[in-house]
Image (cartoon, helix red, strand yellow):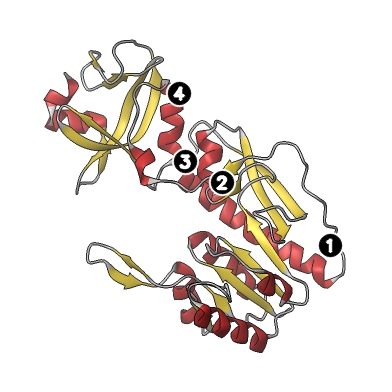
Amino acid sequence: MRVAFAGTPEFARTALAALVDAGHGVPLVLTQPDRPAGRGLKLQGSPVKQWALSHGLPVAQPRSLRLDGKFPEDARAAQQALADARPEVMVVAAYGLILPAWVLAQPVHGCLNIHGSLLPRWRGAAPIQRAIEAGDTRTGITLMQMDAGLDTGAMLRWRAVPIGADTTAASLHDELAALGARLMLQGLDDLARGALRPQPQPREGITYASKIDKAEAAIDWQQPAAVIERRLRAFDPFPGCTAVLGGQALKVWRARVAPGQGTPGQVLTGAPGELTVACGEGALELLEVQQAGGRRMPAREFLQRHPAAGR
């Protein structure tokens, strides 16, 4: 099929690569504009852009798709590019821009979205992170026929995966990216055979996964240890969770709930090499930390370098 593609991060790159590998024609790739990245803050293309250009695919990077918005010239150029591409369908994965009605109506078969949750749970921007943070025991992928709402369209295919006690946003991202690519290909096969069977989303169980704010990174030791531990996994690798212990600013990457009580934020005495902090309920033994500009390291190694942090 002729499949236009819209996506930006690594999650979307996985789907684009699968699309091309399966033999579908991709006459146009939409992705977000280049952003400053790295220590030098040089402009860098998205993972989708880099992959598309390396495989000879045409790329457009409009700042907006709204014809009546702030960048109408970008929207008009994208409209013409999409019309020239003549796609039968568009696949969308973590694109990051709202698709107005003219985009949804342009492909013959509309737009299919690869969404990283079991809809209607966790509609919105950060379904992978919010599922872990909330303590969900499972999540998954939903292939959805897009409409004008926020992740409200009819479901085409879906598949569940478990969330384990050690699952991080990084590991779940990779699992769901691969699963999403497979479901997308199956959905396109169904579409080609006229076998798609859209099902409306359930009306119950709707939740919204708000975008991750860097302000959420600071650990609130007043919270229960189990809640903090889930957030550590949900925010790995971005934005990470931060704390100050023994005068040292740290990112805390891994921890486990441990027995103990004390004033929230208090470092509790324990076995040599252990770094345990009291929480609002229970305590948290820190397992892996990182100082600014440094590498991730076991908490035991950090304590050897900064013994005052354990007191």
Q: Secondary structure at mark 2?
A: helix
Q: Which residue is mark 3?
A: 168
Q: In the rendered image, which quarter contains the N terminus? A: bottom right
Question: Which of pointers 2 and 3 lies earlier in the amino acid sequence?
Answer: 2
**Secondary structure category for the residue under label 4:** helix
Kind of residue at disc 3: Thr
Q: Which residue is mark 2?
A: 127
Q: Amino acid at mark 4?
A: Ala
Judge the density around disc 2: few (<14), some (14-19), many (≥20) Cα neighbours within 10 Å.
many
The residue sitting at the top extreme is 261
**Where, by quadrant of the figure, is residue 30 drawn?**
bottom right
Q: Secondary structure at mark 3?
A: loop
Q: Residues within 10 Å of mark 3 (few under 14, many from 20)?
A: many
Residue 203 in the image: state x and y as whole percent: 77, 41
Q: Earlier in the sequence, mark 3 or mark 1?
A: 3
Q: Circle 1 — which element?
A: loop
* Numbered disc in front, either 2 or 3: 2
Mark 1 vs mark 4: which is more N-terminal?
1
Residue at 62% across, 67% down: 99
Single out the residue that lies furthest toward the front. Answer: 68
Q: Which residue is mark 1?
A: 196
Numbered disc in front, either 4 or 3: 4
